[in-house]
Image (cartoon, helix red, strand yellow):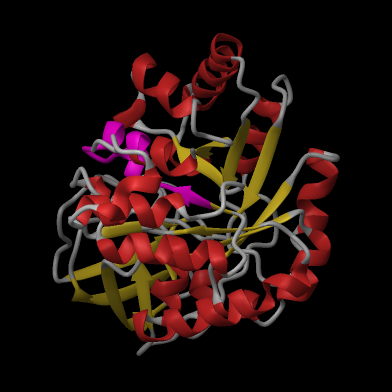
Amino acid sequence: MRYLRPPDRLLREPVSRMTLLCWYLSHLPSMFKTVLTCGPACASDLLLKKMAQVADGFRLNVAHLVGDKLSEWMTRLQELRQQTGRDFSIVLDLQGAKVRIGSYPAVTELPARVELFLGESSSRSERIPVPAASVFAQTSPGDELFLNDRKVVLRVVSKGSDYLQAEVAKNGALSSGKGINSPDRVFELARITEGDLRAIRCSKDFANVAYAVSFVADGHESSLFRPLVADARLIAKIEQRQAMLNLKCIAEQFDELWLCRGDLGAEAGLKELGHLQSLFVAAIPALQRPALIAGEVLGSMVANAFPSRAEVVQLYDAMQSGFSGLVLSDETACGAQVAAVIEFLEYWLK
């Protein structure tokens, strides 16, 4: 992508798709924060240095960083600050109250019937480990379960105290750490996960670290995390309908809110997602907290070197609606066009 002409000349000549895009973006407000997710696609030093020029924060997904990988990434980002002179934040995306499956072999599709069991790991594709007793206590035969942002849908046919037998109603890919949720209820976690505790302990030696808590429901989650992170920025991820009913309470307990449309859309359904976003936008002025938009913000750029026109309009609308910034996930973590994403943001943020 190249934006070579000065903005004041763009519309004085015949308008092409790209010149119109440049003009459109040049008229956006400049104070808009960007949080970029780290992953295999941006692991090179060159890409990270380019990202640092446009990033206000780098997001690390704790659920996908096991062993020493989290500390290795944090060390690299700390060194990147010193190299670039940019004091961007490091945002640890914690699992929070989000129920995820345990260690599981990566598959492109599941067998026709599967068993979910209370446990941490499995080596067989027909047995899915779920390390959360609430899933088994709160689920009944006939219920549906959504896995991996609704890419997989299971229909429960029978249950025991620590297992569920289910038919695969919608097949898709599944691997370790993917989320599991229900359209009818919120699965409860009574305590902070060991993974979150390890991540918080790992972060203590690093400066300017913020913490994003997944699946915040009503704001009480801050009482679990605040004592552990002191006065660090605590971010509430809004990704379930219950949270939409408690935005005021959540804003009173957290420093920042992210509207995360991936899991929110998985729970509420795509038809309702637009309505929920409009409700969130209407609430932004009263919340008096920074609000960032997340979830396929530039989703087409995972594969393509240009954003779609729909995404450009969405960005404009988000900024005009009061959002303070955006969060990119797959676009920079595992996409094929990371350099193009950076170049797009460089022009847009000027």
Q: Which residue is drawn at the image coordinates 56% and 71% (left, top)?
A: 187
Q: Which residue is drawn at the image coordinates 59% and 82% (left, top)?
A: 279
Q: Position of residue 222 (x, y in %)?
A: 78, 57
Nearer to me, 302 or 28: 28
Q: Which residue is drawn at the image coordinates 75% and 67% (left, top)?
A: 250
140 relative position to 196: left or right: left
How many numbered marks, from 0 up?
Answer: 0
302 relative position to 187: left or right: left
Q: Is residue 190 visible in this depiction of the protein?
A: yes
The answer to if 334 sits in the magenta stretch is yes
The answer to if 82 sits in the magenta stretch is no
Which residues, given as a range, are shown in magenta? Answer: 326-343
Q: Which residue is drawn at the image coordinates 79% and 72% (left, top)?
A: 249
Q: Position of residue 65 (x, y in %)?
A: 46, 33
Nearer to me, 31 or 289: 31
Nearer to me, 7 or 253: 7
Quarter of the picture containing the N terminus is top left
298 relative position to 30: left or right: left
Nearer to me, 132 or 201: 201
Q: Position of residue 9 (x, y in %)?
A: 33, 46
Q: Quadrant of residue 186?
A: bottom right
Q: Is residue 333 visible in this depiction of the protein?
A: no
Q: Position of residue 112 (x, y in %)?
A: 14, 71
Up-down relation of residue 223 to residue 251 (above or below)? above
